[in-house]
Amino acid sequence: MEECNYFGEVTYSRLAQKTEYAVLPNFLVDCFLFLGRTPGGGVMRRLLCLAIVCSMAAPASAAPTVDGTRDAAYGSALAVQTLQTQFGDNMDPNGFSNEGELDAGYATISGGRLYVMLTGNVGANFNKATVFIDSKPGGENVLSNLPNYDGGVSQNFGGLTFDAGFEADYHVFGRWGGGAFEVDIVDRAGGTCTNNCAGDFGAATVGSGTGIQSGSAFGNGNGTTSYLSSPLEFGFNNTNVLGVTGGTAASDPVAAAAVATGFEFSVALSDIGSPVFGDLIKIHAVYGNGDNNFHSNQVLAGLPQDLMNGVATGTGNLGGDGNGGFTGNLSGINFANLAGDQFFSIRVVPEPTSMALVGLAMFGLVLGRGRRS
Ligand SMILES: [Ca+2]
Ligand SMILES: [Ca+2]
Ligand SMILES: [Ca+2]
């Protein structure tokens, strides 16, 4: 993988001088510049460059159906729950209970959209499944207490600290009270949108009031101005009765990974900062109360299994202070101080259709070089 360093060294100044590259996708530019500047670069290096592009393209797959049931297109889980849930284990096959858990996190990219699937349950008591997305440079490693949306309870996130390297840009959250499942997405603008955050909202239009729902978010919501270029689609299937059980001990990872239903959404990459080939999208998911001032022990990627944070054994709810205590906000939670990354990642890869263009472009470039020499 040593040669991969070339991807980080190249500059785009050469690109500006070569109009022949102008129509190429950004990810191809990297590879061509690599080919063009390899001092003594042999056939093996060129093949390696192509292999890197091809291997990164491999995971691209068909678009999942956003209905709250996990599609094969997601592949394996990117994060699997490490703990039993201290917010209760749902036993109702119809999905009506106040219990909640996050069993595993999945993501894929298809058709210019990010798809995220969190398997598990969301209680019908307005507790929230919360997702923070880091998909562009900048953002908040420590959440600001200024952004005011969601009836003001967004401010209770103020002071929460993520792992090093996670700088939140967008906030997605879903909840229900037994009626329609509701989802918001908010552009936190680095924590600078004091009371005028851009955001969109939607309530389920299919299956409202049941354990299986779907809908889309598009239009002004708890943010004060709409910003999406296309609807955020969401699905919700709350019928899981397996997965992790109730408690604070280590969970069964096989059972957690086997859950196939939960909260799912897709959003256009152009609506989350337009990450391009090679960029890493980081996703932090957590289950907590409706007022955003008491987090459970259900986080993806999972918490360490032996924090004994206010509980005799295992790892309990984070609460607001990280130890299960209520302080009125989440400022006492610092994921950087907890072992492991409490987020999972997916790298933006070319679409299969793009790869066909790659082949065509490569062929054309080779021909062009042949004529000039
Ligand atoms: Ca960011
Ligand atoms: Ca369960
Ligand atoms: Ca951590």
Image (cartoon, rainbow, N blue to C red):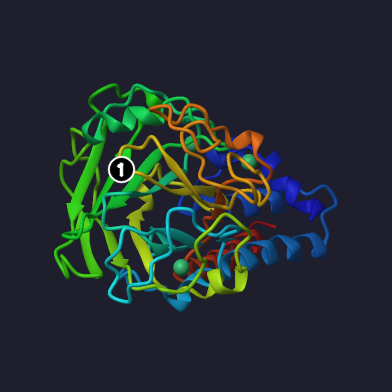
Q: Farthest residue toward the right?
A: 40
Give the quadrant of the C terminus: bottom right
State the residue position of label 1: 290
* Residue 164 visible in the displayed image: no
Horizontal arrangement in the rendering, residue 225 relative to residue 242 (left or right) = left
Horizontal arrangement in the rendering, residue 181 relative to residue 70 (left or right) = left
Q: Tell me where residue 139 appears, x and y as whole percent.
A: 46, 31
Residue 301 to residue 238: above or below: above
* Residue 234 visible in the displayed image: yes
Residue at 33% from the left image edge and 27% from the top image edge = 155
Give the quadrant of the N terminus: bottom right
Residue 133 to residue 369: above or below: above
Q: Tell me where residue 219 appears, x and y as whole percent.
A: 15, 46
Q: Tell me where residue 81 appears, x and y as whole percent.
A: 56, 60
* Quarter where residue 53 is shown: bottom right
Q: Secondary structure at mark 1?
A: loop
Task: Give neighbour class at mark 1: few <14, some 14-19, many 20+ (Cα, 10 Å).
Answer: some
